[in-house]
Image: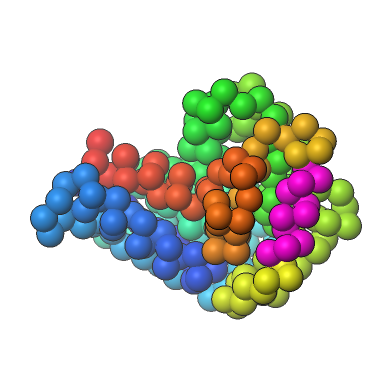
């Protein structure tokens, strides 16, 4: 089994899910007392958010490169960034550390392509919705990505940092997200990417019949496949 290096704390709430899903997935495939061989570096979320707010992605890249190299030196054979937004620096990180960074957008694009969908909506931080790092991976697979309007993007971004990142999940926020999803479907979305690792804690398949792509689960599955390859 290959050793995984998980970069977490971005936020710690979703990092718990990654650890749980990867270990459960390994055990499901191997049985017995087999679980993932991995290590976790968990950041202080406030430090990452301070960089984000200052648009200082070079500083974030420096921090995550250092953590990843420490894990590589400890035996990690691939890095799993336990957050969608951090994949904005994933390609540069991979160049810096010279081991694979399992990319959440590439894994998600593969699943959407398997479903035969050509147009999907995206919910995530402003960075994930507005920057090209996720969109480009979809375009490479012939998939168009559409996003909410500016007012909705601002509110979604706010809830991710001020609610979900603190472990707060409100019924009224769930209702709001479902309304935004319906707007995207009205614009032609065949499915919705839950493009923040905390959103699946807010919305489940029991809440809507709209097809959803849980990037946390998809990414964890990609990590399991790598570990067992």
Residue 122 location (% of width, % of height):
69, 45
Extent of the magenta region: 174-184
User: Which residue is found at the position 72% from the left and 58% from the top?
Assistant: 177
Percent x, y of residue 96: 48, 46
Task: Check if residue 51 falls in the magenta segment.
Answer: no
What colour scheme does the image use?
rainbow
- Above or below residue 135? Residue 34 is below
Residue 10 sits in which quadrant? bottom right
Report whether residue 90 is seen: no
Spot occupied by residue 76 in the image (x, y as percentages of width and height): 30, 53
Q: Which residue is drawn at 63% across and 50% down?
A: 208
Q: Residue 150, can we see it?
A: yes
Q: Is residue 228 above or below residue 86?
A: above
Prevalent SS, magenta region: helix
Question: Residue at horizontal 86%, vertical 49%?
Answer: 149
Residue drawn at x 29%, y 50% is 25
Q: Nearer the viewer, residue 168 or 3?
A: 168
Considering only vertical position in the picture, is 189 above or below 155? Answer: above
Front position in the image: 94 or 213:
213
Residue 71 location, quadrant = bottom left
79 relative position to 107: left or right: left
């Amino acid at each position: 089994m290959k050793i995984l290096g998980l970069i977490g704390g971005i936020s710690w709430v979703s990092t718990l899910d990654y650890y749980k899903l990867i270990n459960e997935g390994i055990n499901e495939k191997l049985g017995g007392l087999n679980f993932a061989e991995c290590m976790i570096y968990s950041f202080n979320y406030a430090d990452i958010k301070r960089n984000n707010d200052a648009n200082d992605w070079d500083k974030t890249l420096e921090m995550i490169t250092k953590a990843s190299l420490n894990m590589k030196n400890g035996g990690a054979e691939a890095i799993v960034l336990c957050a969608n937004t951090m994949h904005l620096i994933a390609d540069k990180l991979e160049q810096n550390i010279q081991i694979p960074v399992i990319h959440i957008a590439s894994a998600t694009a593969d699943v959407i392509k398997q479903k035969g969908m050509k147009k999907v909506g995206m919910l995530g931080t402003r960075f994930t919705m507005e920057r090209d790092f996720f969109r480009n991976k979809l375009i490479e697979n012939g998939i168009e990505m559409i996003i909410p309007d500016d007012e909705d993007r601002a509110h979604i971004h706010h809830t991710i940092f001020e609610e979900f990142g603190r472990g707060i999940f409100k019924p009224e926020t769930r209702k709001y997200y479902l309304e935004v999803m319906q707007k995207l479907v009205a614009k032609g979305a065949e499915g919705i990417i839950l493009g923040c690792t905390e959103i699946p804690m807010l919305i489940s398949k029991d809440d809507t019949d709209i097809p959803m792509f849980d990037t946390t689960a998809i990414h964890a599955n990609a990590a399991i496949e790598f570990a067992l390859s």
